[in-house]
Image (cartoon, grey):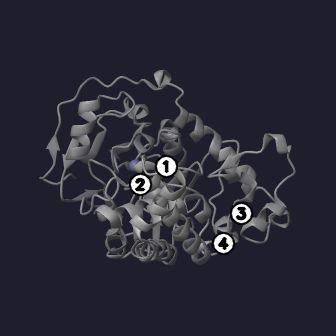
Amino acid sequence: MLSSTIKRLPQRPLIPLIPQIPWTRSAMVGALLPGLILALGACDSDDAPSATGPDAAAGAPDTDDSAEIRVAGKDIRAFNPVLPATAARTLPVDPQLGYHVSEVKDNLYVVTDGVWQSVFLTTGAGVIVFDAPQSYGARIPDIVREQTEEPITHLVYSHAHLDHIGGSAAFADIAGLEIVAHERVADYLVEIADPARLIPTATFSGDFTLSHGDEVIEMSDRLQYHSNEADLFIYFPQQKFLYAVDSLTPGWVTFQYLDLTTNVHAYLKLGKEILSYDFDLFSGGHLTQLGTLEEVQASIEYTDDLVQVSREVFEGTDMLATMGEAGAQAGFANPFLLFRYYQERMIAQCSERMLARWQDRLSGVDVWVDGHCDKLLSYHRVD
Ligand SMILES: [Zn+2]
């Protein structure tokens, strides 16, 4: 049952609007990426480049040079391959179905299309679904039905973002469904009135324990590490499983700009909060694998190292002298241009050092490290 701290929200009519959701760019990416990942994952390891760094391009397929694609200023084929350890942990997405579902702990199931992840829990008294991603959320009711005869009784939102709950409209016809969210998430969803995101029926703030059937789930808003409204740590104590969406991607470097956090200061406390939980399996809501404790610790260590390296670069770079170098060539009439030179000089130094330390430990470091350095250098300068 729900705790006494829960608040009830007045309901507006729920109208299933799935067919009316526009074919947005993000939806298109959601549809395309699983196939791309499958294609990459299907490569025989003998065909994959064994080295990291620029030589890795030697294993890339021959394509027409006139069609060269450049990312972050370099040939897309020059980026490091996914590390073997990451590839080995990839959850197998069924190419026909477009998703993977499996019971990863007692009564706890993970669903993924290779880019997004969500979970659901059978309790003996109904199924609790956590998030309904925009890419495959509309299929979750059928996916649940394939795994259990228990009806869906609850839908819990990790946070307000469209990509994680934009498939919730498909739950509109489920009679008696309780939709649980943080009160600030509910306020935001009421305000924006997005038909793709159902309005919560029950809200809370602080710590909230949901006991249902044989299961207990502990939720907390103890750190607003990612979004503007609230982010939940969702913990399954009986399964020793932690679900903290848009926090870390185990096996992989953290997503763009520290997972698009709107608060770097809070994000830098994330590792300590995560490690305060007693877990041995983790989902951050994205990408190809779940995380062991050791993999999560490596992701946290990356962030700690980034703080240290970026601070050393920041403190070791004289802003006025560096801008002066640029001004000597370009003149001093455009301070923005001179500052950008200063920032890019620091980003390059920070990225080079981080890449050397981490490209053999996490996949994707060369994709996002410059943005991580950019974000931290600005943090050191103004926060
Ligand atoms: Zn998010």
Residue 81, image x and y in percent? 71, 63
Front residue of 2 and 298: 298
Residue 82, image x and y in percent? 68, 64
What separation in Å lies between label 1 and label 4 (alpha carbons)? 32 Å
User: Label 1 is placed on what type of residue?
Assistant: Thr
User: Can residue 41 be seen in the rendering of this structure?
Assistant: yes
User: Label 4 is placed on what type of residue?
Assistant: Ala
User: Label 2 is placed on what type of residue?
Assistant: Thr
Residue, disc 4: 85
* Marks 4 and 2 in Cβ contact (< 8 Å): no
Label 3 residue SS:
loop
Is label 1's Cβ within 8 Å of ligand 1? no
Residue 63, image x and y in percent? 85, 46
What separation in Å lies between label 4 and label 2 (alpha carbons)? 31 Å
Q: Which mark is residue 226?
A: none
Q: If you read the primary sequence from the N terminus, does the residue marked by circle 1 or circle 4 appear first?
A: 4
Q: If you read the primary sequence from the N terminus, does the residue marked by circle 1 or circle 2 appear first?
A: 2
Label 4 residue SS:
helix
Q: Residue at x 70, y 60 (%)?
A: 79
Q: If you read the primary sequence from the N terminus, does the residue marked by circle 3 or circle 1 appear first?
A: 3
Foreground tag (3 vs 1): 3
What separation in Å lies between label 3 and label 4 (alpha carbons)? 11 Å
Q: Which mark is residue 148?
A: 1
User: Can residue 255 be seen in the rendering of this structure?
Assistant: no
User: Label 3 is placed on what type of residue?
Assistant: Pro
Front residue of 93 and 114: 114
Residue, disc 2: 122
Residue, disc 3: 81
* Marks 1 and 2 in Cβ contact (< 8 Å): yes
